[in-house]
Each structure stands twice: as structure tokens, then as C-alpha cells.
Image (tube, rainbow, N blue to C red):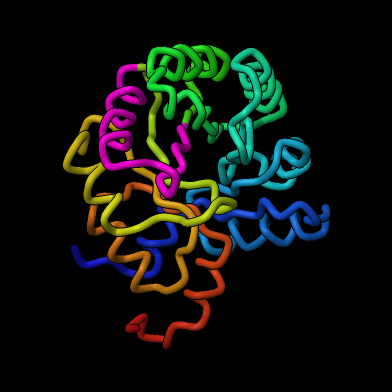
Amino acid sequence: MNLTPSDVLSRVDHTLLAPAASEADIRTLCEEALAFRTASVCINPKYVSFAYGILKGCIPVCTVVGFPLGASTARIKALEAAEAVGNGAAEADMVISIGDVKDGRFDRIEDEIREVKKAVGPKILKVIVETCLLTEEEKRRLCHAVLDAGADFIKTSTGFSTGGATLEDIKLFFEEIGGRLSIKAAGGIKTYEDMVRLIEAGADRLGSSSAVRIIQKLPADGQY
């Protein structure tokens, strides 16, 4: 796969989920997304309407649901997702209940995903499974739970737990459900090489707050 920096950026959800993010910070994020043609901006629900007013559909607005712990009830997650879509969000990244995974209640997880997917309708739903807290068997079972529940993506991480995306997890996801469910790698992506390797391993989308800054520092010929 011969990826250019523009190819990479077109797969990046340009992210700002910091609790202290201000309207000025969100405006800068949106302006960078427009300039670099990222896949979306990914922001907290509070700023969806504000960002949509800046981007006007030129770049999709992605938001988070049940973030970062996934411990809200399914009903609240669905309401949060529906409100975000009403405010202009084209994509929602929801966090599952990790406790349900540990209890082996994959039926509950699927029901919750279905409820949120119903709330977003044809908009894109990504499901954050927080891989750093999971066993390999749990990761494999979640691949199929997310697929069977009708979501569009499985996503590795919030970036707010004990670890982020790893090459091994992307390879595992691709091996288990590649071609049937899209994959998003997020959390701890620090270099251009990281981004390229994750895409080559099977990631369709990357979540990163630093991708634009990393690519701005590349040599003019795009070689790293």
C-alpha cells in the first residue's frame, strides 16, 4: 500500500476531547480539518452544533456517546446519540459497558448497540470496546457482537484508559471481521509510521489529536 500524507489524513478523525477545550480550540480544530481534508472532526457533544456551523457539511462532525467510561444506561446513550445527530453529527462513537463484557453479557452489549444504532439511523456508528481492558477472547467475541448488532465500525480505545491502539489489536480485528466491519484505531498514535502501519494492518479510520501536527512536520517530499 503506497500511502501519501493526504491519503492518511483522509482516514483521520481529527480529535479534540480534552475537558478544557474551548470554543476557540474547536474552531481551530475545524479550520485544520478543512485545510487538511480529514475524515471528520471528533469532539464532545457540547460542541456539535458549534462545529457544524463552521464546517457546514464540508467535513463530517463526529461525537462521542457514553464517553469515556461507557457506564451510562443504554437509554441515556441512545438519547445522547439522537440529540447529537439532531445537532448535526454525522458519526457517533459510543463506549460499551466494559462491566457487561466482564460479566459475559454480550447479549446486553448487542442490545445496547442496537438501541444506539436505531437512534442514529443511517448515520455512522462506531463502537469503542477499550481493548486495553480486554482479554484476547473478549476482543474476538466483541468483534462479532458489534458486527451482529449492526454497527458500522469497531473502535479500539477512548484514549482515556490505560492504553490505546496497538498493531496487534488491529491485526486481530482484521483477522476476525475484516471486510465485514470497518475498524478504527484510536489512542496513543504518535508518529506518521504508526499511522501508516495501522492502516496497512487493516484500520479504515484513525482517531488522533496529533495527526495534523505530525504531518505538518514531514519533509516537503512527504518522506518520513
**Res. 210 image quadrant:** bottom right
- Total marks drawn? 0
- Horizontal side of 107 relative to 118 (left or right) equals left
Q: Looking at the image, is 60 positioned above or below residue 122?
A: below
In the rendered image, the quadrant that contains the C terminus is bottom left
Residue at screen point 60% across, 46% down: 42
Answer whether residue 224 is magenta in the image: no
* Residue 41 pos. (x, y %): 59, 49
Front-lying residue, 204 or 189: 189
Does residue 91 appear in the picture of this structure?
no
Closer to the camera in the image, 178 or 136:
136
* Residue at the image position 57 percent from the left and 46 percent from the top: 59
Q: Position of residue 53 (x, y in %)?
A: 75, 41
Which quadrant holds the N terminus? bottom left
Based on the displayed image, in which of its 4 quarters is residue 25 positioned?
bottom right
Determine whether, in the image, residue 161 is placed left or right of residue 178: right
Q: Which residue is depicted at the point 58% across and 61% down?
A: 209
Span highlighted in magenta in the image: 126-148
Between 37 and 132, the one lying in front of the other is 132
Q: Is residue 144 rendered magenta in the image?
A: yes
**Res 149 visible:** yes
Q: Is 198 situated above or below 118?
A: below
Spot the residue most to the front. 103
Q: Is residue 44 left or right of residue 209?
A: right
Considering the whole magenta stretch, tell me its main secondary structure: helix
Residue at image location 47% in from the left, 29% down from the top = 124
Q: Is residue 101 above or below residue 29?
A: above
Q: Nearer the viewer, residue 168 or 52?
A: 168
Q: Position of residue 107 (x, y in %)?
A: 39, 13
